[in-house]
Amino acid sequence: MALGRPVTLSPNVASKTVSITATAGQTLFEPSGGYRINEIAVYRNGTRLVNGQDFTARDGASVLLVSGATLNDVLEFQIFDSFNIANTIKPNEATQTITGELVVDGGIIGAVLGIQSAGSLVGTARTVNFIGSGNTVVDNGDGTINVSISGETAGIDTSATSEFTNISVSGIATVGSAVTINSTGIDAVSGVITASSFVGNVTGNTSGTAGGLTGTPDITVRNVTGVAATFTGVLTYEDVTNVDSVGIVTARGGLEVGAAGVGATITSAGNAIISGFSTFKNDVTFVGAAANIIFDQSTDDIIFNDNAKAIFGTSSDGIEVYHNGSASYIHDSGTGDLNLCMESGSKIVVQSGTSGSHLAEFNHEGAVELFYNGSQKLHTHNTGIHVTGIATVTSVIYTGSNGSSIAENNLNFASSGKAYIDHRTTSQDIDFRVSHSSALDRTAITIGSAGITTFYDTPHDDIGTLRSIPLQDESGSGGAYTLVASDAGQCVHIHGTTTGVLVNDSTFNPGDAVTIVNGSAGTMAITQGSCTIRYTADSTTGSKTLASFGMCTLWFSGDSVAYLSGAGLS
């Protein structure tokens, strides 16, 4: 016996049980024949499962377990259904078949009776009433009843034409095989209906000529053909496929196609308002005050004549594109920027003609490239610009933020700290060239990669050749000669009336050197003035005497101390 609350069946309710053996992990089960939603109980190995907690059954065909079954689990599906008895009346069925007789003691409320004419169904009714006398009703015994209606025919001559002021037909009157008269009107299958006047609506197919058509409220015809038609009221075309006019159609109050605001309207002032699509299959000209705009269908072109502008922006507050007869313009006449935008992987190209050489390329988030006759001359990169060929600057090139610049005949370093001239490739020299007899024909200075500087000729400074000691001749002082700062690096030659040399402090800089030569036949004094002279031979300080034709050197370690050495000193 299954475990769980047993199922109690209400009277007139049937059930069936479908058993399925599960596979390992199976969650989806489809009991044969399906089930009615909320009319199913599920047992797993005899234990009843809870709907919505252990399983779901929502589509009438499948049952889904929340947790997968174990191999060989037995799932039993108890499916409930209505208990039906054969050949009974079903309350909600539209069509039913009952084998045998149905005997009703009393009336059938709501039932209808089929009415046939010549074997064909013409309608249904709950009650059929035959008016007049002499009607014959025959029960055929097969469920059908034949009715023959006889009525008064006085005054009707069936062998000739009869005329009536009014004909009242409550049923159906058939005139020959062509005309049928019933409660809804006259149906002429063939032939002609002729009347001096019609009251009410006249509908149907007509042939020949119809004249004097009047009626209230409506006269409906298929086609109107004539030399002229005059309508004093509103002419409404309910379903017109085509309007074919050989001449001019004049609509003085305007023309409206379709419902107002949905189709198209042409006002009496000539304004066209079109709510849907407009298709033009030939040239279209928009006539302006001074310039036209033309759609040329043969070339698929929209042509803006000279000085006709394409303006993008409200109230002309935007960009203008036009040609004035001699030049073309893209003019940003509004507020804001003129942005040329591109997506990733694309670029903006300015070129000569539709397939000519590129003049400029603007790559998406990349380089800007400029060309001359198809050859790239300048492009930008993440560290600056690259120029191919000669870059001519008529003024100054400024570098950095401190004002360093390169100008004609001038290289100016303005930043604080050291300035550098670098060669970033190893084992390469730097040459400084000049034009001697022709352009750049002489290398004046070469700075080698090993740090050795080579000069084209012997280096000079403002004193003389750096490999010689320039001569400073002193012969007419008439006493001792006082050394000055410009004597640094020179040889002071004492002779004539000059009798000696005086050395003071604060005259020379550290590292300066002065050579002194006694060119006379007598001795001369080297006098220590406000500085200190230290003799290198014995470390004594003070003035010294230089012998005849002797030579010595003073080297300054500071602005007030000099070291003296040489031949002929005492």
Image: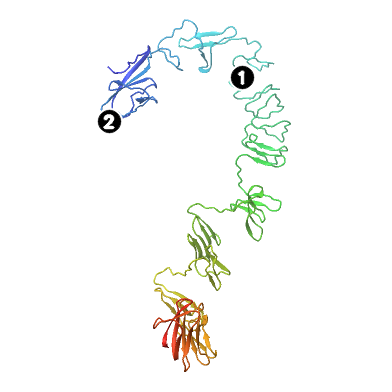
Q: Nearer the viewer, residue 521 or 285?
A: 521
Viewer-side label of 1, 2: 2
> Quadrant location of the C terminus?
bottom left
Please identify the quarter of the rendering in which residue 243 is found. Answer: top right
Answer left or right for 264 relative to 408: right
Residue 252 image position (x, y, % from top left): 73, 38
> Quadrant location of the N terminus?
top left
Element marked by disc 2: loop
Residue 372 image position (x, y, % from top left): 53, 66
First-in-chain label (1 vs 2):
2
Answer left or right for 424 relative to 28: right
Element marked by disc 1: loop
Q: How is the image coloured?
A: rainbow
Q: Residue furthest bottom?
A: 521
**Mark 1 touching mark 2, by CB under 8 A?**
no
Q: Is residue 154 above or below residue 236?
A: above
- Which kind of residue does numbered mark 2 sit on? Ala
Number of marks in the rendered image: 2
Q: Is residue 339 above or below residue 178?
A: below
Q: Report which residue position mark 2 lands on.
A: 24
At a point 65% along the width and 50% down the height, the residue shown is 317
Give how far apart the Cα atoms at labels 1 and 2 are.
Answer: 74 Å
Residue 12 image position (x, y, % from top left): 38, 12
Residue 437 image position (x, y, % from top left): 51, 83
At a point 54% along the width and 64% down the height, the residue shown is 402
> Label 2 crowding class (10 Å Cα cut-off): few <14, some 14-19, many 20+?
few
Q: Nearer the viewer, residue 252 or 512?
A: 512
Q: Report which residue position mark 1 lands on.
A: 184
Q: Is residue 116 above or below residue 488?
A: above
> Label 1 crowding class (10 Å Cα cut-off): few <14, some 14-19, many 20+?
few
Q: Residue furthest top?
A: 105
- Which kind of residue does numbered mark 1 sit on? Thr
